[in-house]
């Protein structure tokens, strides 16, 4: 029998506050004024007195990588149109995948036959931007953004089928971004997000794939490494009564393959960036997910040489439940930091 454990916020909050208080006491021992956080009241008081967190620092000689990005984006928004790069923007003319399925499958839909002329060699590109909708706090550079990402898989070398686009995934999202630094912990700059995301491939049944998520995201850094932890919750949809029904859940088991979180570690040395990303469903008996490596090479020009390696499930929505390995070579238009 599988055991489950449930904790309420009333149990967790005192423990978190106690741990935070221990860190705060140790980190501030050498300071003139010590911040003690041993209760909820202490936490609220410290927050109101600006003793707990602070926004981006513009007067420091060595701002952190995240801090540089937040400040640069804020200046660009104030002075220009305010359209910013969101996720990576790239073009990969040569991308090889290990497998091309005969059918695309989903538990709630009929099997959909793939193009028999489909090749393992194809091209890929991703276009991603965000735009600030309104300011929440000028002091903390906190804003609400609209983001949009389109990722396309192009059968460029399949001349028998007139080089069609095999799949395109669209992801509009809206999120609140709150960058800050925790003073008592003496941690380098952090960036938190809370958002809603809809991702779909815009197809009709039986090729239709989509899901909606509420997510949180936390970025922090240590030396030349920047880390991101992004857990999410998939919003439930109605079950289809039969596999020809248009409305309802197109892919009820997508979380089993796409996972429940993403963790990324990015190392930046000058303009050279190396990133490791994992997704996982956290199932002990049927563990699935994906790993990816992105290597961005330094360049004197705007376009940077780029290598992308992927292994696992969820390379695209149409084949979310197909395990494959992919390697691609291309150019990057915008990086993370």
Image (cartoon, rainbow, N blue to C red):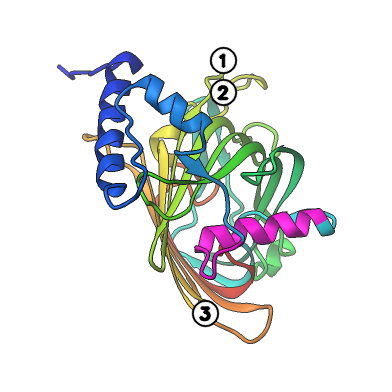
Among the two numbered marks 1 and 2 on one chain, the one whose residue lies closer to the N terminus: 1
Which residue is the extreme one toward the front? 32
- Could you tell me which secondary element the residue under label 1 belongs to? loop
Cα separation between marks 1 and 3 = 45 Å
Q: State the image coordinates of residue 249 (x, y, percent, origin top left).
A: 56, 23
Q: Residues within 10 Å of mark 1 (few under 14, many from 20)?
A: few
Q: What residue does disc 1 label?
A: 238
Position above or below: 54 against 293: above
Report whether residue 318 is seen: no
The rendered magenta stretch, by its main secondary structure, is classed as helix
- Could you tell me which secondary element the residue under label 2 belongs to? loop
Q: Nearer the viewer, mark 2 or mark 3?
A: 3
Q: Residues within 10 Å of mark 3 (few under 14, many from 20)?
A: some
Residue 227 circle label: none
Q: State the image coordinates of residue 158 (x, y, percent, origin top left).
A: 65, 67
Q: Which residues are magenta?
A: 59-78
Q: What residue does disc 3 label?
A: 297
Q: What residue does disc 2 label?
A: 249
Cα separation between marks 2 and 3 = 41 Å
> Is the Cβ of the residue at disc 1 closer than 8 Å to that at disc 2?
yes
Q: Is residue 75 left or right of residue 220?
A: right
Whether residue 316 is in magenta: the answer is no
- Which quarter of the image is occupied by the N terminus? top left
The one nearer the camera, 84 or 220, is: 220
Q: Residue at x 52, y 25 (%)?
A: 108
Q: Residues within 10 Å of mark 2 (few under 14, many from 20)?
A: many
> Is the Cβ of the residue at disc 2 closer than 8 Å to that at disc 3?
no
């Amino acid at each position: 029998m599988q055991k489950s454990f449930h904790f309420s916020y009333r149990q967790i909050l005192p423990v978190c506050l106690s741990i935070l208080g221990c860190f705060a006491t140790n980190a501030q021992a050498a300071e003139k004024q010590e911040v003690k956080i041993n209760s909820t009241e202490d936490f609220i008081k410290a927050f109101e007195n600006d003793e707990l967190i602070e926004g981006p620092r513009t007067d420091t000689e060595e701002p952190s990588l995240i801090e540089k990005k937040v400040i640069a984006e804020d200046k660009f928004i104030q002075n220009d149109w305010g359209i910013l790069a969101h996720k990576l923007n790239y073009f990969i003319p040569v991308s090889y995948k290990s497998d091309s399925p005969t059918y695309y499958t989903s538990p709630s839909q009929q099997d959909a036959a793939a193009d028999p002329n489909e090749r393992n060699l194809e091209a890929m590109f991703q276009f991603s931007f965000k735009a600030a909708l309104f300011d929440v706090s000028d002091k903390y550079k906190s804003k609400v953004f609209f983001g949009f990402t389109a990722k396309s898989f192009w059968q460029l070398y399949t001349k028998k089928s007139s080089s069609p686009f095999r799949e395109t995934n669209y992801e509009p999202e809206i999120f609140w971004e709150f960058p800050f630094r925790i003073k008592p912990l003496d941690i380098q700059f952090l960036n938190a997000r809370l958002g809603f995301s809809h991702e779909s491939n815009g197809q009709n049944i039986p090729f239709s794939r989509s899901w909606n998520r509420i997510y949180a995201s936390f970025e922090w850094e240590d030396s030349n490494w920047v880390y991101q932890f992004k857990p999410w919750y998939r919003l439930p949809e109605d079950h289809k009564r039969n596999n020809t029904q248009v409305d309802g859940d197109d892919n009820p088991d997508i979380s089993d393959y796409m996972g429940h979180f993403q963790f990324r570690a990015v190392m930046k040395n000058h303009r050279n960036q190396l990133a490791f990303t994992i997704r996982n469903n956290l199932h002990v008996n049927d563990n699935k997910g994906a790993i990816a490596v992105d290597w961005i090479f330094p360049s004197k020009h705007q376009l940077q040489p780029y290598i992308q390696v992927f292994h696992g499930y969820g390379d695209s929505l149409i084949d979310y439940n197909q395990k494959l390995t992919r390697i691609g070579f291309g150019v990057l238009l915008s990086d993370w930091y």
